[in-house]
Amino acid sequence: MRAAIYPGSFDPVTNGHLDVIQRAGTLFDKLIVAVAMNDQKHKSTLFSIDERIRLLQETCAHIPNLRVVRLDGLLVDFAKEEKVLAIVRGLRAVSDFEFEFQMALMNRKMEPTVETIFMMPKEEYTYISSRIVKEIARLGGNVELFVPDCVVQALAKKFSVSVGINLSAAEG
C-alpha cells in the first residue's frame, strides 16, 4: 500500500490545501493529513488543534482513503511509524521553495526511506495563504472564495463578524 503524509498547521484549511489534498489522494492508496501542534513560542494559531482537525475532517469527508490526525513530535518519526513512502508538501511560489527544500533535505538525512513530493496547487489557489485569509476575515472581508463553507462560518465565530457575506451586494 502506497501511503503519504501531508503535514501542516492548517490554520485554517484553505482551498489551496484542499486542492493538494484531493490530488495527493488520487496518487496514493492512503493519505494522512497530519495537523501539527505548533510550539506557542514560535507560532500561535487562531484555531485550536481540535478545531483544525474537525474542520479538515468535515471538509475532507468525501475522500475515502484519507485520515486526519494530530502530529506531535518529529514528522519523520511519525512517517516511519506509519510506514509511508512520501511526505507531500505544497509549493505556492518560489518564496516557499527555500524553506521546503531545506526541510526535505533534513528529513531525508534523518530518514532516507521517506521521499518528499512537492505539489503545486492549481493556479487559482497560488495566492491563497492561511495568514492572508485570517487577516481578511479579521477585517470583516469576504473569504468565501478562499476557504470551504465550514471555515467561513468558523472564522465568523472567531471574529464575531459576517466574513462570508458581501454586504454591498446584499443591500443592492
Image (spheres, rainbow, N blue to C red):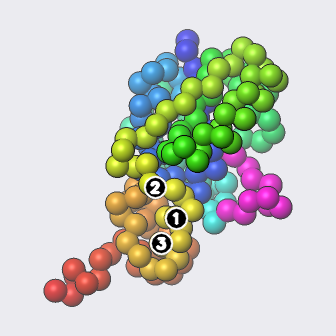
Residue at left offset 22%, top offset 82%: 170
Q: Residue at image x 52%, y 76%?
A: 138
Principal secondary structure, stretch drawn in magenta = loop
Q: CA distance from mark 3 to mark 2?
A: 11 Å
The residue indicated by pointer 2 is 128
Q: Is residue 98 above or below residue 44?
A: above
Task: Indicate the quadrant containing the N terminus: top left, top right, bottom left or bottom right.
Answer: top right
Contact flag, marks 3 and 1 (Cβ < 8 Å) = yes
Magenta-drawn segment: 32-45
List the residue tagged with mark 1: 132
**On-image quarter of the C terminus:** bottom left
Q: Disc 1 to disc 2, how far (Cα)?
A: 7 Å
Q: Is residue 171 above or below residue 13?
A: below
Local SS, label 2? loop
Magenta segment includes 6 = no
- Residue 157, position in %: x, y? 51, 74
Q: Are marks 1 and 2 in contact (CB under 8 Å)?
A: yes
Res 70 seen here: no
Check disc 1: other Cα within 10 Å, few if <14, some if 14-19, many if 20+. few
Report if residue 2 is visible in the image. yes
Choose between 32 and 141: the one closer to the eye. 141
Q: Earlier in the sequence, mark 3 or mark 2?
A: 2
Q: Position of residue 30 (x, y in %)?
A: 53, 23
Write the residue at 52% across / 64% down. Answer: 132
Tell me the residue that label 3 is attached to.
136
Q: Amino acid at mark 1?
A: Ile
